[in-house]
Image (cartoon, rainbow, N blue to C red):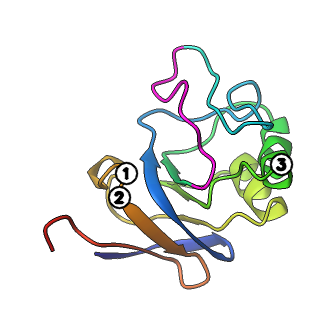
């Protein structure tokens, strides 16, 4: 399956799809030293985003979230790539600073993507590819 969207931060990344049904706040929501989601009550609390293709609708919270994404890249715990339904400034700036490939506007609900499957994000081309199970 190949989906096309819009490039936000150039580069390529590959990893298991980790899909959040809720927005993510990187400030106080993700530990930059481990990559663990630590926001209490978040559906992905306890999950590690390191080397995943992290898909979520949009970010929330403080502009310091951009710095947390940058710090995640410096500690080696950043996602391999980010997919948003609609990019907003905090996440886009963090992805660009951290050299994390990022795309948005795929034209399908993120919930329709197969959780855990290996996906390849080519943000330079604005594409996300994965093999459908049973294909």
Residue sitting at the far top: 40
Write down the region rendered in magenta.
41-51
- Element type at mark 3: helix
- Element type at mark 1: loop
Is 101 or 8 nearer to us in this picture? 101
Q: Position of residue 26 (x, y in %)?
A: 71, 35
Marker disc for residue 88: none
The alpha-carbon separation of the residues under discs 3 and 1 comes to: 23 Å
Are dots 3 and 1 in contact, CB under 8 Å?
Answer: no
Q: Which residue is mark 3?
A: 75
The numbered mark, 3 or 1, whose residue comes first in the sequence reads 3
**Magenta stretch: dominant secondary structure:** loop
Q: Is 29 displayed left or right of 109 in the figure?
A: right
For the point 83% across and 51% down, the residue is 70
Q: Which quarter shows the N terminus?
A: bottom left
Among the 4 quarters of the image, the one containing residue 117: bottom left
Q: Which residue is mark 1?
A: 116
Q: Position of residue 27 (x, y in %)?
A: 77, 30
Q: Which residue is mark 2?
A: 117
Are dots 2 and 1 in contact, CB under 8 Å?
Answer: yes
Q: Residues within 10 Å of mark 1 (few under 14, many from 20)?
A: few
């Amino acid at each position: 399956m190949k989906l096309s969207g819009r490039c936000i931060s150039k580069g390529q990344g590959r990893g298991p799809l980790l899909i959040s049904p809720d927005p993510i706040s990187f400030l106080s929501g993700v530990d930059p030293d481990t990559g663990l989601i630590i926001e209490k009550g978040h559906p992905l609390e306890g999950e590690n985003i390191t080397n995943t293709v992290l898909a979520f609708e949009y970010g929330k919270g403080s502009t310091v979230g951009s710095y947390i994404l940058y710090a995640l890249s410096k500690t080696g715990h950043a996602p391999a790539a980010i997919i948003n339904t609609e990019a907003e400034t905090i996440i886009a700036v963090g992805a660009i600073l951290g050299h994390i490939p990022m795309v948005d506007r795929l034209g399908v609900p993120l919930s329709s993507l197969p959780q855990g499957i290996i996906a390849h994000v080519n943000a330079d081309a604005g594409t996300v590819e994965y093999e459908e199970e049973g294909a």
